[in-house]
Image (cartoon, coloured by chain):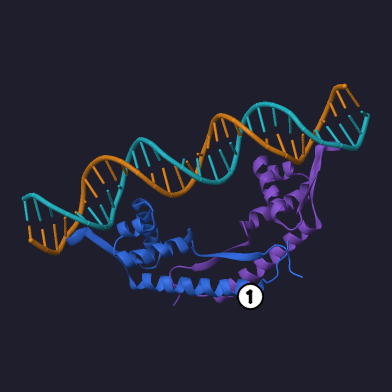
Chain colours: A purple, B blue, C orange, D cyan
DNA sequence: ATTCAGTATGTTTTTAAATGAATACTGATA
DNA sequence: TATCAGTATTCATTTAAAAACATACTGAAT
C-alpha cells in the first residue's frame, strides 16, 4: 500500500570559509557563464543578473580564494573581458564533484519518508 | 605544509513535497518551541518571529503533511494553545536523523579542500 | 587623440519578505 | 455572562536585497 504523499530530501551544498559562505551553485553558474562568454558583462546578461552584482561576486570569490578564480582584463581591444584561471576551472570541477557525492548519498539514504 | 586558508563544506537539508519546500530547520525549530512553550504565540516570541509568520508556517506544515504536525486548541482556559501531535514529534526526530547522516557524510568526504 | 566595449564604483529605485498593528473569534472557567 | 489568553485574519509599515541608473576608468587599435 503506497503512501498518499511523496516526500524527498533536498540538499544545498556550499563551501564555507572564515568570513562566511564562499562558493555555492550561484557563483558556480557565474563562473561557467564567464567561461562561456568571455566577460562579466555578458555572463551577467546571460543570467539576467545585474552587472554590478556579478562583478561583486567575482571580487568576493577572488579575494577569498587562495588565488583568484577569475582573471579580469582591463581596456584594450573590445574593452577587455574576463576569463577563468586554472583555479577557477578547478573550483567548478571540485564543487560539482562534492555536490554530486553528497546528493547521491542523500537520495540513497532517504527512501520512504513519511510525515 | 598546511594551506593558508581553511575551507569546509556546508550542507542545508530540507524535505520537499509536491508543492515545494515542506520542512526545513526553521520549521523544526518552530515545532520544538511550540513543544516547549505550549503555544504558537510564545514559540514565536521565543524565536523573535512575528506570530503571523509562525502561524502561517504551522498552517502550511499541517496542510501538507499527511496528518497535522501541530494540534491547535481554540479558546478555553488560557485562551487555548498548541501542541505537537505524534506525527509532529516523529517529524522532528526523522528530520534530525536524516540531517545528521548527510552532514556527517559531507564532512567525512571532503577533507583538504583547496581553492 | 579618438573610439570602443568592458571593467570599476557610487547613488537611487524597486521589490519582496518580514514585521507590526489592529480586530474579531473561541470556549473553559469563575 | 464577563473574563482572558491564545488563535485567526486583514491591512499598513518597515527593511534588506537586488536591480537599475549613472559615470569614470582602462588600454589596444586605428
Q: Is residue A82 visible?
A: yes
Q: In this view, does B110 lie to the left or right of B78?
A: right
Disc 1 crowd rating (10 Å Cα; few below 14, some 14-19, many 20+) is few
Image: B35 above or below A71: below
Residue sitting at x 71%, y 52%: A63
Q: Where is residue A90 in the image (x, y as percent from the top left)?
A: 77, 61
Look at the picture and state if A78 lies above or below A27: above
Total numbered labels: 1
Residue lying at 70% horizontally and 48% vertically, measured from the top left: A59
* Residue B83 placement: quadrant: bottom left
What is the x, y in percent for residue A81?
A: 80, 43
Q: Which residue is drawn at 42% across and 64% down?
A: B29
- Image quadrant where residue C30 sits: bottom left
Pointer 1 chain = B
A44 displayed left or right of D28: left
Label 1 SS: helix
| Residue A107 seen in render | no
| Residue B23 at x, y percent in the picture | 46, 63
Q: Name the residue under label 1.
A: B108
Quadrant where the C terminus of chain B sits is: bottom right
Q: In this view, does A65 lie to the left or right of B93?
A: right
Tell me residue A10's x, y (percent): 55, 65
Amino acid at each position: 500500500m503506497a503512501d498518499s504523499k511523496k516526500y524527498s530530501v533536498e540538499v544545498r551544498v556550499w563551501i564555507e570559509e572564515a568570513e562566511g559562505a564562499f562558493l555555492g551553485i550561484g557563483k558556480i553558474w557565474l563562473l561557467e557563464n564567464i567561461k562561456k562568454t568571455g566577460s562579466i558583462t555578458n555572463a551577467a546578461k546571460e543570467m539576467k543578473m545585474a552587472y554590478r552584482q556579478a562583478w561583486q561576486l567575482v571580487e568576493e570569490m577572488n579575494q577569498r580564494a587562495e588565488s583568484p578564480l577569475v582573471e579580469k582584463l582591463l581596456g584594450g581591444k573590445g574593452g577587455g573581458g574576463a576569463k577563468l584561471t586554472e583555479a577557477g576551472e578547478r573550483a567548478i570541477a571540485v564543487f560539482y564533484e562534492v555536490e554530486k557525492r553528497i546528493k547521491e548519498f542523500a537520495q540513497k539514504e532517504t527512501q520512504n519518508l513519511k510525515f
